[in-house]
Structure formats: C-alpha cells, structure tokens
Amino acid sequence: MPDDWRSLYEARTMDSRQALSAIRSGSRVFMAGGCGRPQLLIDELVHLGSKIADIELIHLMTIGLAPYTSSKYENRFRHNAFFVGSDVAGAVREGRADFTPTNKYQICRLLRDRRLLLDVSLIQVSPPDDGGYVSMGITVGISKTAAECADCVIAEVNPNMPRTCGDTRLHVEQIDAFVLSTNLLLEAPAREVDRVSDEIARHCSRLIGDGATIHVGYTPVTYALSKYLRRRNDLGVHTDILTPPLIELAKQGVITNACKTINAGKIITSLCFGSRETYEYVADNCEIEFHPAEYVNDPFIVARHDRMVAINEVGQVDLTGSVCMRYVGPRFGSSFMIGASHAREGRSIVTLPSATPDEAESNIVMDFDQKYGIAMATNRDDIHYVITEYGIAELVGRTIRERALALIHVAHPKFRDELMYAARARNYVHADQMLQEHIAYPDYVESRSTTADGTPILVRPARPTDERKVQSFLYGMDEASIRYRFHGKLESLHHDRVQSFVNVDYEGTVTILGIRLGDRGGEEEVLAIGQYLYDSLTDQAEVAFTTASSFRCQGIATCLLKTLISMAQDRGIRRVFAMVLRENQAMLRVFRRASVPMESTFEDGCHHVTLDLSATVPGTPRGRRRTAPFETTADPPPPRRGHSH
C-alpha cells in the first residue's frame, strides 16, 4: 500500500469546530454509542447548538449523559431513539424525542438500502496503522455500517481506542475529517447484583450445559451468572455486548469456543462494555472478533449455532407467554431469541424479577399495563423459558393452560391468588384448578442418569404443568400395576383427581417423576412416579411408587425411593411407611435395598413396611444432604428449613 494515505490523513485532520461545520440545519446525524462514543465531537456539537436547528440525532445505547435531550435544546436537536435507554427515556415520554422500533440488524439493512439516509456519521477510532486503516475498536455495532453509508464521516482519533480483530477496519480514504483526541474511553460500571438477580442467574445456569454457546446482555443477571458457570466446560460466546464477566470466564478456561459450530475458537461480538483492563484484554486479541450488528445480530446466523442459549431481560410477561419491555423499547436480544429458538438444541430464555422493587405490582400479569408505555419485545412462540427468582417456567410446546400454570408458579407469592383468579375467569385454566402452595421448586433434587438398558432418565419433583404427562402415565398402567399401586381398580382419572398428584407443596406432599429424555435432551414421557404424604398426627409419611411395566428392574424405582427418603429426611420426617401387596415382591426388594432400617409385618394379604429415617445413612453425618442416587444436575441446595407440619 503506497504512503499516499499519510498526506490525505494529514490534510483531513482539523479541529472539532472545523470538522463539524459539515453539519447543517436539518441534517440527520448518527453518533456512535456505547463506551466508544466520540465524546469530544458530541460535546462540540452541543456547543454549536445555538447556530443550527432541527438536527435529527440517531444513536443506540449510550454510557454517560445525553445533554442534547434537554428541553432547552428542543428546537435544535430532535433525538430519534432506536433504543430507549435511561438517558433518553424522559425525552421520549415527554414527546421531545422519537422512538423507531426495530432491531440492530434491521437498522443496518435500512442503512444499506438507503431507506434511512445519513448526512453525517460521528465515530471514534484508533490511529491508522501502517496500511492506513483505523480500527473502530470496542464500538462496531451499527457504527461501522453507519460510517460506510453516511455522506460524511467525521472520526475522533484516539490512541486509547484499542485495535480489535474482526471486521473493524476503515481506510483513511473512507473518512472525511479527523479530529485528534486523548480522552479516556468511557467505562461501564459493573452491574450491582442483588438477591433476586442472583437467584435468577442460578436458575439460568441450570439451562446452560457444557459446549453451549451463550448470548447475554449488560444486566445484573449476567454479572451474577458467571459464578454459576465456573464448572462448565467449553462454553462459546456469540453476543452483541461483551462484558467483564464473560472475559473472566474466558480467562478461567470456561469459555473456549471449542464446540461452536461456526466461528469455532472465537468469541464473536460487536460491542464491549467494561473498564480500561477490559479494553486492554480485547486489544489485538485474535480469539475475540468484533463484527457489525448486521452479522452478529442476524437471527439466521444465531440459529446456525448448535446449543445456542440466549438470555434476555424483559419488563413484563403475560399469562400466555407474551413478553414486553417496560419503556425501554425492544431490547436487541429479540433477534437472539428468534435465532436461539430455531437453533438445534437451542434455548431462548427471558428473565425478570417477579415483582417491582417495592413489590407493589407483579411483573407477571394477565394484561400488560399500558401506563408504562410497554413495547412488545418478541413473539411468544420464540420464548422457551421464563425465569424469575422463584424458578423456571417452561413454555415451549405448552398449551395456554399449561403456560398460565407455569407462570403463576414462578410469580411472586403475593400475586399468585389474583393471577389464578384471573386465569379461571378467562378460562385459561379449569374452574376448579388448584393453586399450588407458595413453596419454591426444589431444583436441587433433580438428577440425571441412564437406566440399566441405557435410557436417559431425568428424576425431578412434579410441577403443576405435568398433569397431562401424569394422566397419560396412569392411564397406560397395566392391570397388575394398577392393583399394586391403588389396591383396586382405576375407573377414571379426570383433572380433578390427577391435579392432586402435581399440585404439591414439596414439604408435606411430594411427587417425584422419572422421565425419559429424548435424543436432544428434552423431556418425553413419564416412566415412574413416587409420592409421599405426611401425617402430622402420627409424624410419619406414607410412601408409594410405581414404574412402567416395560421399565421395571432398571433401577428407576430404587432411585425414586432414595430421592423421597432424602427429601423426607431433609424436612425432618422421621418415619415413612407403605402397604405392599403380597405378590408385589419386586417392590419389597426395592424397600429392602433402602439405606435405612426397615421393619415389616404381614396382615390381611399386605406387607406393612416401615422405614426408620431417624437413623443415619452409614458414613453420612445427620443433617447433611445424602448423596443423590444419580448425578445431580443442579447446584447445592439452599439452607434447609425445618419441617413445619
């Protein structure tokens, strides 16, 4: 490359006022956002406000102040927001700024197709290299596309802007004016993690397995999530905003990108939010590539990642699973949600606190509250999971009734009664639908393994949405199994009876399911059911379980019994008993294999079996959680509560 660019660069270098003289009244001006916003140019533009009028300003999320949205500049600047952040929300709400709902990759398309014409683009770049190329560093996003499409490009050249790998370069010839700056780059503060965010992050981590590729935003949940992913292996990253928690996981060897189906070995992003140390880490790091949003946010690109997990924060969710933002416009994660929902073994997840900070209003609602200016974030059929601090609501493939039940189950307990009342009134659920006790779902009990014949099995507590699965299992039992389980015939299992199997409080009443897993890890059919029911008068619980006839002698019943014993012991239950028909010798063998003392008497054709849970399992200190019969899928349980029945 000849050195002609040097003289061109020198000729086009000028002070900020001279460079901004290209902006005339009525111009449409794009300003790069994020931590790479050109501060010197923006400050000078505001100072020139008295000499120009009706300037339309466009940018995405910014870090810092947005003085041009002040009411004193109302006739000078009109902000057009593609993202309504906290810095411009007031101006939009008061009608002093506009809002254009769209996605990042679609903004790039509007620019490419010249449906959105830009007169001037203000960007911040690194100094040119020996070939005459500057780097857009940590702020590529839509800024590079805007620079390539604007009639005039003004660049703030700053040696503090790191050169980054990927599609980040512009040649000096593509830029009309250069303004030199030595301002420190803006730094994004770490997001404060509270108890709610931490619990949400813990639940999210359960849906992220080894080898998954993740998208997360600049949210408290992201900062909390990193500590729950430290034991994962070979995670990948394809996200629009790279933040310090992800970089820490990369440094720890958790994020290797080795299993990514495209861009293997590379973190792919378009923006970076963080501190000076963060920017030093991404500088010239060939394992991190920055690309424009038209690539990073393209849902068709996202969908090419196997095991893609997209996590986004929303404002409200209604009982059908529609999600909306609370006056911030659509988060650009919506394209990631669409992509993840179409990816092979992908998972699209939305998170939100169950209620407002003062707990005055529920964030899970029957109908969206328009007083917040709520904007639809994405289609409900693109959402697989909704997570609050109270647990995970699985929506994919669910009916409206099942969605409503799942969402009420993770709503704030303060609002569950009124949500159930509203759901009954609108016929979302049965008129006699029971409301589950306000007890947190014990995810720490979940475990996975395979049966003796190699069938993948998930053992977990039942949820209200399991009603149909349980009903199908019970109707599929053979006559002998029905007699062993119910000591008689089973005429029918209507909703009013089956719901008692799944609406349990996980304390005095517990139902455990053994579920066959599909080839891609999804739940298929129930293969076994175990239950206990506590009687406070006798201080003991009756236990019962049954297994599908084609899966007997595979170890499932033993696993269910051990899980029930562990849960009962953790809740302070000292004895469990069962009545086993004489001919049901297989069930007696299961009880004899239990790791607690057993007593048995025989009367009227039944074995009366009693297990003494007050005795410790050999080698296990009293009060400690027993080893799970299968490998656990969750993090260690929270502190135990004493039995309250």
Image: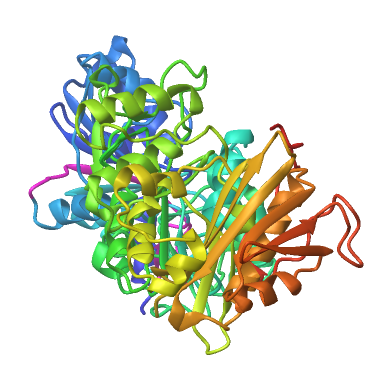
Residue 490 drawn above or below residue 362: below
Is residue 279 in sight in this rendering? Answer: no
Q: Residue at x 86, y 63 (%)?
A: 617
Nearer-the-camera pick, 4 or 321? 321
Relative horizontal placement of residue 107, taking residue 87 as reference (left or right): left
The colour mode here is rainbow
- Residue 596 coordinates in the image, percent (x, y): 82, 64
Tally the marks: 0
Point out the residue furthest to the front here.
604
- Residue 222 coordinates in the image, percent (x, y): 54, 48
Relative horizontal placement of residue 231, taking residue 401 as reference (left or right): right
Q: Is 18 covered by the magenta stretch?
A: no
Nearer-the-camera pick, 111 or 293? 293
Tell me where the magenta segment starts and ends, as one range: 115-137
Magenta part mainly helix, strand or loop?
Answer: loop
Corner quadrant of residue 526 = bottom left
- Residue 442 coordinates in the image, percent (x, y): 60, 48
Corner quadrant of residue 183 = top right
Nearer-the-camera pick, 521 or 273? 521
Q: Is 135 covered by the magenta stretch?
A: yes
- Residue 167 coordinates in the image, percent (x, y): 37, 68
Quadrant of image for the C terminus: top right
